[in-house]
Image: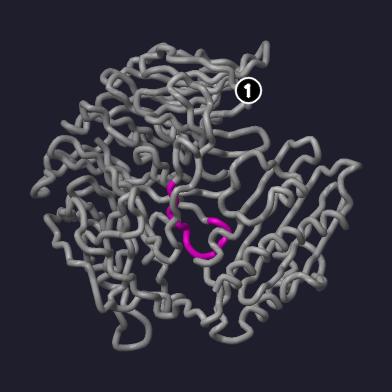
Amino acid sequence: MKRHLAAALAAVLLLPVAACTDDVEAEAKPDATERPTEIQAAWSSDEAQDPYRDTRFTFHPEGTLTTWRVANRIVVLGENGATAFDQEDGHTLWSLTFPAALGQVCAASETTNRNGSAALMFSHGATCTGSIGALDAATGKLLWHRTLKATSTFHDTAYFSGEARPNVTDTSVTLAPTCGLFLIYDVRTGAARRSPLEPRDGCYDQVAARNALLVASRTDPETGADTLEAYDDRGHLLWSRPNDDEAEVRTIVSTTPLVLDLSLPGGHRLYRRYDDRGRARNFVAYENSDSFPTLLGTFGDRLVVSYGFGSTYGNPLMAFDVTTGERIWRQDPDLTPEVVGRRGEQILTIEGVLPGPTSGDGYSRAGAEFWIGVIDPAAPDVTKALGRIRLTTTGSHALFSWDEKNLYVHDGSTLTAYDLPQTGDEPMPAYPEPGSGRVWAEDDLTNVDVVDSCLAITDTTIEALGFRTDLPRPSGCRWRETARPDDHDKTMYVEIFPISEVDPGAATRQVQAWKKQKIANFVAAMKPVDGLGDEAWQATQATGDTFTSRLIARRRNVVVIVHYQSSGLRDDAPRPTAMQARVRRVFTDLDADLTRILDAR
């Protein structure tokens, strides 16, 4: 059973206190009058190896430190080996250094199987295409390793995906390194097994594996027929269905219920539920083609994910009904902690808090605190406090992992374990505000007010700009459409900025500053637009087959930027003047929502 954590980007694998450099010292968080109870360290060890860090664009909901729980052992994966510690007192049970010829660990399975075996990949130079192997995490024995080799000219290792991750089951280690290729090895011996998907010299198959389930989207090269197929880990076919919408499977989000991460024609990336016979049911949550959501997975009948949604502040947690696809709840951005993860059937939260001012200017970064809490996905309004931990360092390079019993922190060269309560009894105290945090004027609209405003853009407006309206709305208020018959490529980004008016006129000054940024606007000088909000400016350019329009408009203290671009226009496409007016309709829809919020006060 695995406890593995990683953040979405390598540069952001550090907890947010890492951002408190000397240049932004004023953003540090001051002391709080009320704190959670301090959690004392259960044990510490300086024998952990330099930890493996996943640097790819993935998120693992159980930490930035790769650990596995096997019986009474906590196994920490390093770049060049692994070490097992006794979970109770932290003494070293075994330590293993991998052969130098293998290179460094570059990928690992999310879990171990029931026997404690994990799958690993090793780098070949700068790419994760060197070798694959299996580790017995119970005994510390490297069971086997095999060099990854090209199976044909088309399936050369040079074309292997840097996102490929090995999967482990009780019988097999599997890997889908590139389209049209699926590799299976015996988990104990490394012997190659016959794949249910024979390699084909062409990108005809997309494959994903999770636990003992394999799902493949396949295209027959002769007939062009598309099918979606599922196999068990021994290669036995479970079901096969026509794939009428030409969806390509990317990952398996959940096996029970079955939720797939799919790519659809036109550049769309969505989650969709399937029944146990492979029949497509509803889409779940928002489209995520142009964003990096934090996916925590399914909790019973709920899919929990953290999205940015067109507001500049916060990535609120949201839960969606898997059966209907509709949103059940959304947490306010101001209440969403900086790090969220999964702990069994709870949502674990970590908030970095700096201890307080120094004797001089600014805030001390030494002795960083991290407040730990849990959220019940069925009752998300209250975060229960588990406690707080205090580090002797800045915490800027701390890596975290957790299981049902402990929180593990690798900081510097030390691994420390903290006993975590199963649940909290008291609500989490209010997080301290940043030293120079936002203070709103009495009549300001805030980021909490506008976090859902993008949903107010009507289907009529979206369709007029050439986008599909039969799919879920995109997260981040970012539309993208490719290979449609009306024109080839379209994008639209909508950004909503509440500006504090504690300093009167701040929003107006911000509009003036932004409209002068020619590089950011991609077009010529912006011209005023009458009758749109309190003020509006727009620039439009049509060059060859590309049309670009950028609109900056303000209502009260809220500034909206709409950037729209379409390329590959047909001869009968709407002329620039018509498209210019359609872009303005985006703000008209948003303005109606802002006015509704203001009138309700």
Residue 35 in magenta stretch? no
Whole-percent x and y of residue 103? Answer: 37, 37
State the residue at coordinates (87%, 48%): 574
Query: What's drawn in magenta, residue-wise?
Result: 309-319
Whole-percent x and y of residue 434? Answer: 40, 76
* Residue 589 visible in the picture: yes
Q: Is residue 352 above or below residue 239?
A: below
Determine the main secondary structure of the stretch shown in magenta: loop
Specify few, some or many for label 1: CA neighbours under 10 Å numbering under 14, 14-19, or 20 or more. Answer: few
State the residue at coordinates (47%, 58%): 315
State the residue at coordinates (74%, 75%): 535
Question: In terms of depth relative to the viewer, which is nearer, 397 or 453?
Answer: 453
Question: In terms of depth relative to the viewer, which is nearer, 386 or 392?
Answer: 386
Read off the residue under disc 1. Answer: 244
State the residue at coordinates (35%, 41%): 299
Residue 311 in magenta stretch? yes
